[in-house]
Image: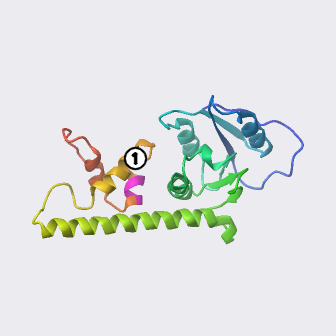
Amino acid sequence: MTEVPARAAAAPPRPHNRIRVGYARVSTREQDHDSQLDDLHAAHCREIIIETASTRGDRPKLRAALDALRPGDTLVLHRPDRVARSMKELLVFLEDELHARDITLEILTGICAGVHRPGGATLADRLLFAVAALAAEMERELIRDRTLDGLRAAAAAGRHGGRPATVTDDILAIARARQARGESVTTIARHLSVGRSTLYRALQPPDQSITA
C-alpha cells in the first residue's frame, strides 16, 4: 500500500470524525494527478493511497484500504470515477462495500461533492446511500422476477433439474462480474438473495468437485 504523508498547510478546521483515508487512482493518460493529491492533502487525510489504473480494472490497493477501514471511518475521493466507471458500479460500491462496513464517503469535487453517511441524521447526509439501496433492491426484484419467469417456462416445457433453480444464467453472469471485481462469494450471495453454498457451487468450473 503506497502511503503519502499529509502535507502541513493552513486549511479549514479538521473534520470531527475518525480515520480519514484518501484514495487516488492515477493513469499515465491523465493529467490530474497533482489536482487529486492536492485536494486529498487539503482534506486532512491521515494517509493517501495511490493506485495505478489497470486495463483489467483491478484495484488491489483500494481493496486493502477498505479492509483496513473500520465503522465510522471515512474514505475520501477526488471524484467518484476514482472507484467506479459508471453510476451503476458506483451504487454497487456504495451499497456492498461502504454501507456494509458503515464507512462514510467524502467526495471532494463534482456533482456528488459532499459527505455521504450510511446512517446520516438527515436525508442530505444519506441520500446517495439511499439511492444505492434502492437500486440494489430493484436489481434483486428483477432477478427474482426473471427467475420465476424462467421456472414457469421450464415447467410448461416439462424441463426439470440442472443447476439449482435459484441460480439462473442472469444471476450467474452478475455473480461472475462481481467476483471478478474482487467481491467475496458471501457478499455476492447476500446481495443476490441466494444461498452462499449454492452460489459457490454454481461459480465453480464444471470439472471441479466442490465441498460447500
Residue 196 visible in the shown view: no
Residue 202: x %, y % from top left: 26, 49
Magenta portion: prevailing SS class: helix
Which residue appears at 56% of the width and 45% of the height?
Answer: 66
Q: Is residue 17 magenta?
A: no
Q: With 54 as the anchor, is 178 left or right in this view? A: left
Image quarter of residue 158: bottom left
Residue furthest top as drawn: 28
Q: Is residue 189 magenta?
A: yes
Does 176 sit above or below residue 189? above
Say what secondary structure mark 1 lies in.
helix
Color scheme of the displayed model: rainbow
Which residue appears at 42% of the width and 63% of the height?
Answer: 139
Residue 39 visible in the shown view: yes
Residue 171: x %, y % from top left: 33, 56
| Residue 1 vs residue 50, the one in the foreground | 50
Residue type pointed to by label 1: Ala
| Residue 159 vs residue 69, the one in the foreground | 159
Q: Which residues are magenta?
A: 187-191
From the image, tell me which residue sits under label 1: 177
Q: With 109 as the anchor, is 182 left or right in this view? A: left
| Residue 86 vs residue 126, the one in the foreground | 86
Which residue appears at 53% of the width and 33% of the height?
Answer: 54
Which residue appears at 72% of the width and 41% of the height?
Answer: 46
Few, some or many C-alpha atoms within 10 Å of disc 1 (few <14, some 14-19, many ≥20)?
few
